[in-house]
Image (cartoon, rainbow, N blue to C red):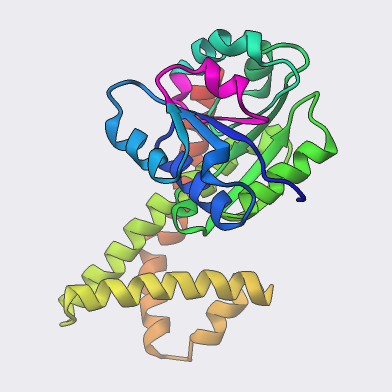
Amino acid sequence: MSKLLKLGFLGGGKMAQAMANGFISAGLTKGDSMTASFHPSDHANIEAFKSFGARTYVENLPVVSGSEIVFISVKPTVVSSVLQAVRPASAGKLFISIAMGVTLRELENSLESTARVIRVMPNTPALVRAGASVYVRGSAATDDDCKVTQALFQAVGTCEEVPEAMMDPITALSGSGPAYVFVMIEALADGAVRMGLPRDLAYRLASQTVLGSGKLVRETGRHPGQLKDDVTSPAGSTAAGLSHLEQNAFRHAVSGAVESATVRCRQISSK
């Protein structure tokens, strides 16, 4: 990308801050090329964006007027009203929405017809530049818009294009998935503490084990079942542990969590 991007954020919470920090670190923009809008009482997040060198506002229109690319990072319940207010300045702009459950149709209907929209589902590991993001292009979005979106979100992890019909199960998997993994890390550490390990050591080992296992799946391209078998010796400790998990419906519980979360996402989207 040959020039620094002029980026605006409608809402500047933790995810917006993670993205902004990643974009700056990747050399895609600079702090003084960014603007962000906030509720007047949102002092902590205002100060966070100011620390990047960004200009901050307590109204949304200046952010849209002064930006090439506008991130919609407010709560889903206020997206429609926020976009209606900035509609006069939206013509010809690229809007990237990270608002969960807000469809492309809703976004496009709230903006001028020449505005381009891309919908993204990131996740919280973007805070440490290890996010898993997907995006859906709107009806007016160009190939160049998609390339820019991919470059931006690859600065905070991975990013790939998907059809919009996949967004609810993806939200349930990678959007909600960190919560499931945190519970697993906590459970692994609890078991180790019961067996005599100090809790801080147990958390360090459990979290690194999850991190390394995910990396092994991604980088080897091997099926998780094959990698599991590599660790499992006949009549060994791993086999005993896996047997306990199977007897207690571990696999069913985890896959069921993704199914339940997908159903809830669809309920929210339908509203």
Q: Is residue 137 left or right of residue 234?
A: right
Please determine whether, in this image, residue 158 is positioned above or below residue 66: below
Asked if residue 91 lies in the magenta stretch, the reply is no
Residue numbers of the magenta segment: 57-77
Please report the residue visible at 69 percent of the width from the left and 17 percent of the height from the top.
108
In the rendered view, does 199 fall on the left or right side of 100?
left
Residue 168: image quadrant is: top right
Residue 210 on image: x %, y %: 43, 70
- Residue 181 image position (x, y, % from top left): 40, 58
Answer above or below: position of 244 versus 160.
below
In-front residue for pair 42/100: 42
Residue 76 magenta: yes
Q: Is residue 123 visible?
A: no
Kindly indicate the quadrant of the structure image that contains residue 154: bottom right
Check the image and report above or below for 112 versus 227: above
What residue lies at 56% left-to-right and 72% top-to-bottom?
Answer: 215
Residue 35 seen anywhere in this rendered image of the structure: yes
- Locate residue 77: give its quadrant: top left
Relative placement, left or right, of 247 versus 92 is left
> Residue 228: percent from the left, percent from the top?
53, 78
Q: Position of residue 252 (x, y in %)?
A: 46, 54
Q: How many marks?
A: 0
Q: Residue at x 45, y 42 (%)?
A: 53
Q: Residue at x 25, y 76 (%)?
A: 202
